[in-house]
Amino acid sequence: MLIDWFTVGAQALNFLILVWLMKCFLYQPVLDAIDAREKKIAAELADADAKRAEAKKERDEFEHKNEEFDQHRAGLLTKATEQAKGEGDKLLGEARQAADTLGAKRQEALLREAKNLNQAITRRAQQEVFAIARKALADLASAKLEERMGELFTRRLRALDTDAKARLAGAVKARSEPVRVRSAFDLPEKQRAAIQQALNETLSADVPLRFETAPDLVSGIELTANGQKVAWSIADYLAALERYVGELLQEKAPPAPGAPAGPAPVAT
Amino acid sequence: MRLSPDEVIYWQQGFFKLNATIAFTWGLMLVLAVGAKLITRKLTVEHTRSRWQNLLEIVVTNITRQIEEVGLSNPRKYLGFLGTLFLFIAAASLCTVIPGYEPPTGSLSTTAALALCVLVAVPLFGIEDQGLGGYLKSYIKPTVVMLPFNLISEVSRTLALAVRLFGNMMSGAMIIAILLTITPFIFPVVMTLLGLLTGMVQAYIFSILAAVYIAAATRTREPKPEPAPST
């Protein structure tokens, strides 16, 4: 007999026991391990996805911030450039204004210096003219300058035209005080007498005179009576000379040949 | 010449006895259970794992996949029964390389026991899946006339399972024994290798057939999808 029924039963029981043993020791642990691993991998993948999403979000945020920063920087740069330009314009304007002021001051200083120089030249020229004239007269005619001046004044009085004589006579008559004769130097008695005589003859009257010394007349003699004046002075020559030197200084050019001669002595 | 290890009796007390079939079956059970326990003791869920764990995972997942391919939608439910069938028969065949070993599956008693287990398990799974009425109705499908044929089919396929496995395993052991007496060198080794292949194939066939029977019994009679109306 090939089949032993006790063995069949025992083997069936053995097989069922083996099924249980295998379930306990093999299938369940292995399947659990596989499930746990799959779960873990799924969790890791989900975690990786979440991290990727978070990284993307952070990257987007960073890029957004970067963009904002760039815009802000560009705005600040533009603003700073405009401010710098404005400041530069302002500084340039101030510098220009300062330069203009300085130029004006320099111009003014130059003018003042020219004026001072003119005055100095005038004074010097006056002194020199006197000295030259005095020396020339002394050398040529043994005559003193003052004497020549007195003679010249006397001659001018005599040479007055009719209208001038009439105005002078009117003025002398209307005066209440003696007619004043001012000179830059003390007139010698001889000169005074000659002037008194010439005036008396010219006006046909005895005119009282009072002689005064006035250094500001600059080597000259003048007679004043109630607004009328007869004078001879070197000041006119000097004024012409001063005008001429002034033109020279302004033009900074050599003087034209044939400088203008001094004006004729005036009688007003 | 003995045809079955049943004939080697170590101990007997009336109806009860301890023969070589039962003894070697216990040995196999011990090896399988202890081996599984040793390996699964240090299971890890990390990405790196031991080779033995890899081997067990490959075995288990492939059995699961095979069950699924047969048509059982919930393979883990049947893994215990079908997987153990395969592993037991495969282990019994593999151990034939050990000298003095008698495969328990070379005993008709063992194969009959396994076939009986299948015979009982198929209706149990079918009833669990479809209910008692649903399962019993499957015997009169498509008509009542088919009832005796279905019943004969149940019995005959169980018999076929038992005899097929027994015949293959017994013949393998028989051939090796005969060859050892004729040409003690070389040829028995070759036949042993062939026996290993045959044993693995038989293990596969046995468990796949059991899976097919269970699938046939548990397959829900789903209505076929209506074909889309052609215009």
Image: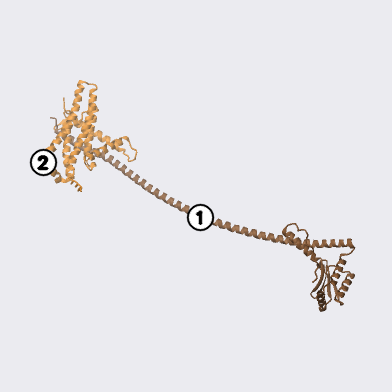
Seen from the viewer's position, the closer of residues B223 and A135 is A135
Disc 1 to disc 2, C-alpha distance? 95 Å
Residue B140 drawn at (x, y percent) = 11, 43
Q: Nearer the viewer, residue A72 or A220?
A: A220
* Chain B pictured colour: orange
Comparing A50 with B199, the one in front is A50
Residue under the image location 19 percent in, 36 percent down: B209
Establish if A70 lies above or below B190. Answer: below
x, y (%) of residue A35? 29, 42
Name the amino acid, label 1. Answer: Leu
Q: Tell me if A214 is positioned left or right of B160 in this view.
A: right
Are the residues flagged by discs 1 and 2 from a single subunit? no
- Residue at position x 58%, y 59% in the image: A90
Residue B130 position in % (x across, y down): 17, 45
Residue A93 vs residue B172, the one in the foreground: A93
From the image, tell me which residue sits under label 1: A76
Near mark 1 (Cα within 10 A), the count class, few <14, some 14-19 or many ≥20, is few
Query: Which element carries disc 1, helix, strand or loop?
Result: helix
- In this view, B33 is above or below A117: above
Q: Which chain is brown?
A: A
Q: Is residue A231 above or below residue B223?
A: below
Vertically, is A92 above or below A47? below
Q: Amino acid at mark 2?
A: Met
Instruction: Give the number of marks.
Output: 2
- Numbered mark located on residue B13 in the image: none
* Disc 2 residue crowd, few under 14, some 14–19, many 20+, Cα 10 Å: some
Q: Chain of mark 2?
A: B
The residue under label 2 is: B146
